Amino acid sequence: MTEDFDDFEPQGEDQVLEKISALDDAEAEQRAESLRAGLSDYELDEEDAALLAGLDAGFEDDDEAGLDPVLAIVGRPNVGKSTLVNRILGRREAVVEDTPGVTRDRVMYPAEWNGRNFTLVDTGGWEFDAKGIHQRVAEQAELAVELADAVLFVVDATVGVTAMDESMMKMLRRTKKPIILVGNKADDQRTDSDVATLWGLGLGEPWAVSAQHGRGVADLLDRIMEVLPEFSEVETTDRRGGPRRVALIGRPNVGKSSLLNKLAGSNRVVVDPLAGTTRDPVDEFIELGDRTWRFVDTAGIRRRQHMAQGADFYASLRTQAALEKAEVAVVLLAVDEVLSEQDVRILQLAIESGRALVLAFNKWDLLDDERRRYLEREIEQDLAHVEWAPRVNISAKTGWHKDRLVPALDTALESWDKRIPTGRLNAFLGELVAAHPHPLRGGKQPRILFGTQASSRPPKFVLFTTGFLDPGYRRFITRRLRETFGFEGTPIEVSMRVREKRKRTR
């Protein structure tokens, strides 16, 4: 390592924290205003001016909204449900492969048609008398119907009604929900006569569509809008309102689905010893600590993305998309196995996404004394760069210590949301630099003219300086920001803008 990238080692103790704690807010703001005024002596660009002008801007709270109605799409395997989902959404969101059973869980997507919002629930193929994992898929489809305001029953028009379709029809009739019958794969008018035979199911008019080509989908959506209520009469949680969004991430088979099921108190997600069972991100609204949280269970991230084939490749991409939509990531690490390069890479993905972070060490009930000693050494070596993240030891299988997730999530999100007043930030910088000046470089010493927090979620700080600050010194400032103001559980970013003094005109 070159000298420039060595960490800055401060000499001696200081009283930065004590001095900041004792500082009067009004005095701190006054000093910051004076420093800000001093920036007029330096060359600033439009971006600088915009940043300085927006220092006092706040955040608007999300408006509360009514609950979107819920539409479940069901049918036996490989009738084109996920293709129809993608057609309705107008984007490739659901995993599609020419293999029956790719969709295994019920998966929720926000959708819109002619200015009306609704929630689309894709389900795994329903099979009567299914065994093993297929049985659990069928149970998920039945649960999706139970929790929907209306149901889209998809049949393959080119095959006609099968015994499995008839079994499903009986199940749907018992629900007393509005059912819309869809004859899919009706790619042209020649197949319309095949769709007409579906009248025999006794579910009313069958709608001829081609999910692959889009034929008839607009008319079907118009019909769906007639059937769906204005607001959901089933859902009890507002997905656009207050619930904080949590992404569960980790390598395959680390226990994400088991944890989600334990938190939800139901078999919400298909769990199977086969690694990589979860393919789609699955949302669940969960009551924890007397509050509602929105959890997203994601497909396990594979070792190398370019080696992931088919469904696993798209699932890996959507895991990253789920992380982008989340506010806080819970990274699950299995303590009964050695921390891998893959674990560290997933952690890095969470940090780079700028989300708040909680580390959940799963399978803690399987830990013996010898493994515990090795684990502490692994954490010290491999997780030193995230020592600021709250740690929770849990068992996803038994639910042991699941209640400890709430304070960890609260801590991380509070830090992620945190804003430091400009006066207090500049007082901190002034005291820190006075106690530990930047090392001389080529006979010059860069100064920090002014600092501001440009944004939160995650916290980002901008320092106006007279010269380049060594990376090691910036890391030192970051470390001391954490020690002084908290920021436990959130990545923070410190950037700089080197500015030269204005040339005086005579």
Image: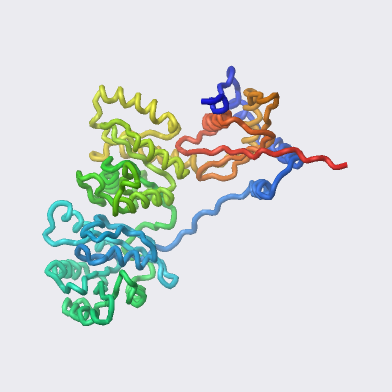
Q: Is residue 7 above or below residue 210?
A: above
At horizontal 39% and vertical 63% (from top left) the residue drawn is: 91
Q: Quadrant of residue 188?
A: bottom left
Q: Quadrant of residue 408?
A: top left
At horizontal 35% and vertical 46% (from top left) the residue drawn is: 305
Total numbered circles: 0
Q: Quadrant of the C terminus?
A: top right
In screen coordinates, is 92 left or right of 501?
left
Q: Is residue 290 above or below residue 475?
A: below
Pinpoint residue 131: horizontal percent, then vertical percent: 12, 54
Q: From this viewpoint, which residue is outermost toward the top?
A: 12
Pinpoint residue 330: horizontal percent, then vertical percent: 37, 41
Query: In front: 40, or 5?
Result: 5
The answer, for residue 439, to whether it is visible in the render is yes
At horizontal 27% and vertical 82% (from top left) the residue drawn is: 189
Query: In front: 248, or 179?
Result: 248
The answer, for residue 181, to whether it is visible in the render is no
